[in-house]
Image: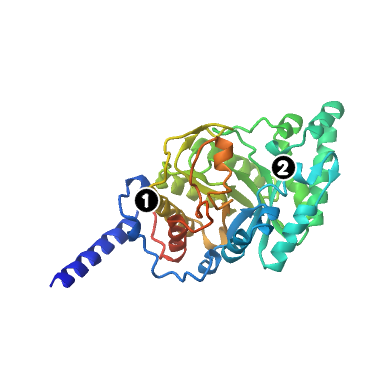
Amino acid sequence: MIIRFLNSMLRATSTIYLLIVFSLCFHSCNNDNASIEQLPTAHLNQNKGLHELSTIPIGGAISINKVLADEKLKDITIKNFSSISATNDMKMYSILRDSTYSFEKVDKLLAFCEEHDKRLFGHTLLWHYGLPQWIQDEASKNGAASVDKFMKDYISKVVTKYKGKVVAWDVVNEGFETSGGDYRKTFWYNQLGAAYVEKAFRYAHEADPDAVLFYNDFNLERDTAKLNGVLKMISELKEKDVPIHGLGFQMHLRMDIPDSTIAYCLKKAADTGLQIHFSELDIIFNKHNDSKDGGEQQYTELTEEMKLQQAEKYKNLVLMYRNIVPLDQQYGITFWDFNDRDTWIKPFFNINDWPTIFDENLDPKPAYHGFADGLKSKSPKTKI
């Protein structure tokens, strides 16, 4: 009698949990008070990596030297990801030092991808934060025409070298202000105006007509003014037949961003018909103001309840992506650093946090299993 009663209670609890998870509207993870044992992972084959559970390309952003020097990190990368991005090794300041090109790290990264049958995603061609100072000094002497020539030469040289091997590029990264719908007043903008974006895409397409070309930015999932500004730019580029093929949502998420807001923004982006890439995914607990050392340390320890809430957030995010983005526009979901030991969040914002799916010992967290469960679960219809 007691056993039948307990089994009945367990079935009822499971039913209630599934109804919550697969409700028509996603709920904020902060309202979930379930225990860690309730996370449904029993159906997953733990011998399979994330990309083997998925029809979506699953990516990891890495530093190639760090991966090659750490066997556990290397094994995680090979097992879980079908797509690889470079955290810093393909940025301009890494490739072009003192006017001399250095492709050593990129070549090493490409060799790793080819050996393990991984897609190599190029991040990034133009980024204000990754601009060597000597280029700015040259521009102040020689003017805008020299900047245009340099930009074309750089993009042509890099993209041509990896033509047919790097399948896609973030052509322009973070070209809009942190908040709102205005262009960021970067070196490129100040020298060439908004036309620099069009030029960059055309130069990249000329170098490799088969490469998939992305615009990539942050806060697009929560700042509707910024999203609208980016979508307006995309519409204007498409009217001019500029070869832009994809939109990258960096997805450096905070736990307090409502799922309904993310779903709304994602639907607007998907309506463009572009490829949609979650390009730099992590989910933090603490707050920040998007600037260096701008973190606000609200949480000093990671509790079991917080682990489950984060797992639920990761799961809901996968379900939104699968449900809202049409299958032929799903370019993939890429984790940035993907472990709490190496995450960029802590040094950049000067806070302690736990934003990824592996812990500091490189062991999978509940977030890993929540994400995996989202890959396997039947995707519910989402009310936008």
As drawn, which residue projects farthest toward the left? 1
Secondary structure at badge 1 equals helix
As drawn, which residue projects farthest toward the top? 141
What mark, if any, has residue 230 been given in the picture? none
Of residue 378 and residue 98, the one placed in the foreground of this image is: 98
Secondary structure at badge 2 equals strand
Which is nearer the N-term, disc 1 or disc 2?
2
Q: Position of residue 352 (x, y in %)?
A: 50, 40
Q: Which residue is mark 2?
A: 126
What mark, if any, has residue 304 been given in the picture? 1
Which three-letter amino acid code belongs to the residue tagged 2?
Leu
Residue 157 can be seen, yes or no: yes
Which three-letter amino acid code belongs to the residue tagged 1?
Glu
Q: Position of residue 374 (x, y in %)?
A: 44, 61
Q: Position of residue 8 (x, y in %)?
A: 19, 68
| Residue shown at 24% from the left, 65% from the top | 10
Q: Position of residue 119 (x, y in %)?
A: 66, 62
Q: Which circle, 1 or 2, is nearer the viewer?
A: 1
| Residue shown at 38% from the left, 50% from the top | 309
